[in-house]
Amino acid sequence: MKFPDSYSGLVSLLYLFIGGNVPAQTPTVHQTENVILITLDGVRWQEVFTGADSTLLFDRTYSPDTAGAKKLYWAATADERRKRLMPFCWNTIATQGQLYGNRLNGNKMNVSNPYWFSYPGYNEILSGYADERINSNDKKNNPNTTVLEFLNNKPAFAGKVAVFSSWDVIEAAVNEERSKVYANSALEPVSPARTATDSLLNEMMIAAPSEFAGVRSDVLTYYTDKNYLREHQPRVLFVSFDETDDLAHAGRYADHLRILQTLDRLIGDLWATLQQMPRYKGKTSLLITTDHGRGHTPKARWKDHGTKTPDS
């Protein structure tokens, strides 16, 4: 199957994986019964495919503890650097799955929306096409029907679609109000709290400091969604992480790498968890992507993205 060169193709793949209508030439025999879509906000292809960027890692403006960051993330070759930064991605996904978007090899994954920032990107990922009405990050309900809403309206998937996000705008992107898809975002508590774990997660959300407005810790988002996965076993799960983008906007490159490495480890933990659950083992596909890129170097506005930043 030829992989599409824009994010809109992810929706086509999602329909394929769960057995929806697919083109006649596409085989309909598949093992996937469940899909987990994961987004890493504002993560560049450069880090994924070549590891830490020396122009940022060795600049004290972006990595104050340059010596410490070098020990953690630097290696002589791109292959070593990327495995050090994202070991699950390169030791498991790269060997057992498929990776797209290495622009050094001419393999491009591009957004088709004209804005190159978050909400337009999430609309495109989830609805399958760009919409110029979605032209800000304002928390306004998405007028478009997402693939999540479409599936949630199907008897086989009703009540089996869920969304967990660190950024509160994601609940608007999936239009929780209209779609009736269960969405838990930012510091929203688990409700109702049925178990001791639910209550503990709620206590942690109250106690944990929120570093960025409208955003909770990605680690908290992960363990909240993992808890829901175990308790409710949804067929379609969308998990949206955010701190990679916020830390980049803040110019904190070493911290950006730290959370990216953490998310790689948590995705590995999620995959291991799925292999222990009969509902998911051998029947679940992960789709992992980002909503936009960002500048190539400090001079090329690495902290930023949008139409004024060509690389994004």
Image (cartoon, helix red, strand yellow):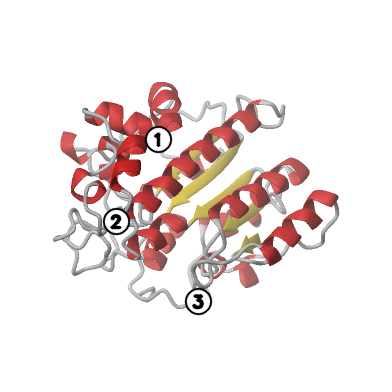
Q: Picture quarter containing residue 309?
A: bottom left
Expressed as whole percent of the image width and height from the top left, the position of residue 160 reads 69, 49
Q: Residue at x 38, y 30 (%)?
A: 98
Image mark for residue 86: 1
Q: Secondary structure at mark 3?
A: loop
User: Amino acid type of disc 2?
Assistant: Val
Which class describes the residues within 10 Å of circle 3: few (<14), some (14-19), or many (20+)?
A: few
Q: Nearer the viewer, mark 1 or mark 2?
A: 1
Q: Report the side of 130 relative to 233 (left or right).
A: left
Is 154 or 139 nearer to us in this picture?
139
User: Amino acid type of disc 3?
Assistant: Lys
Vertical placement of residue 91 versus 307, above or below: above
According to the image, label 3 marks what residue?
139
Give how far apart the Cα atoms at labels 1 and 2 are.
23 Å
**First in sequence: mark 3 vs mark 1:** 1
Q: Residue at x 57, y 69 (%)?
A: 175
User: Amino acid type of disc 1?
Assistant: Met
